[in-house]
Image (cartoon, rainbow, N blue to C red):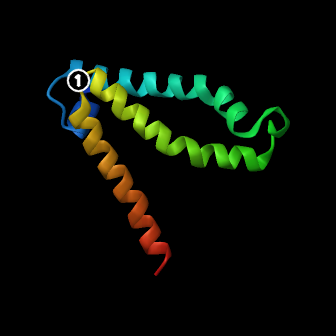
Amino acid sequence: MNNSSWIEKLRQRWQLGSIFQVVIVLVVFACTGITIALIKRPLLLFLFGESAAGSTLVTVLYYIFILPLYNVVLLAYGFLFGQFDFFWKFEKRFLGRIFSGFRKTNK
């Protein structure tokens, strides 16, 4: 039985060169998530104003708007932390899965 740590398993799965690189990738994901969480309220106020807060429609629209923004922020943090190549490949795989899912449902 392989007693590899979870971080070593991530290193292998993501094909990264070192444990340090895994930690940096995890930090990028964390920074992106925190940034998106911090801009949620100002973004909703800007797009929909005070009166639309809590609406189901606003929530659905928020998730539609936030997905491309999340991807851009992820690439920006990836660049700042020196992991742009990893995140660029990650984004291409992610978008490929989304668009292949659309093609399957449209057949």
The reply, left or right, for residue 31 in relation to residue 15 is right
Does residue 1 appear in this view?
no
> 60 and 25: which one is in front?
60
> 104 and 36: which one is in front?
36
Q: Quadrant of residue 95?
A: bottom left
Q: Residue furthest left?
A: 17
Reply above or below: 107 against 61.
Answer: below
The reply, left or right, for residue 22 in relation to residue 59 is left
**Could you tell me which residue is drawn at 66 percent across and 48 percent down?**
61
Reply above or below: 57 against 38.
Answer: below
Q: Position of residue 39 (x, y in %)?
A: 59, 26
Q: Quadrant of residue 86?
A: top left
**Could you tell me which residue is drawn at 33 percent across and 45 percent down?**
91
Disc 1, SS: loop
The reply, left or right, for residue 72 in relation to residue 22 is right
Q: Position of residue 90 (x, y in %)?
A: 30, 43
**Could you tell me which residue is drawn at 66 percent across and 26 percent down?**
42
Q: Quadrant of the N terminus?
A: top left
Q: Where is mark 1, residue-wise?
A: 82
Three-letter code for the amino acid on which mark 1 is drawn: Gly
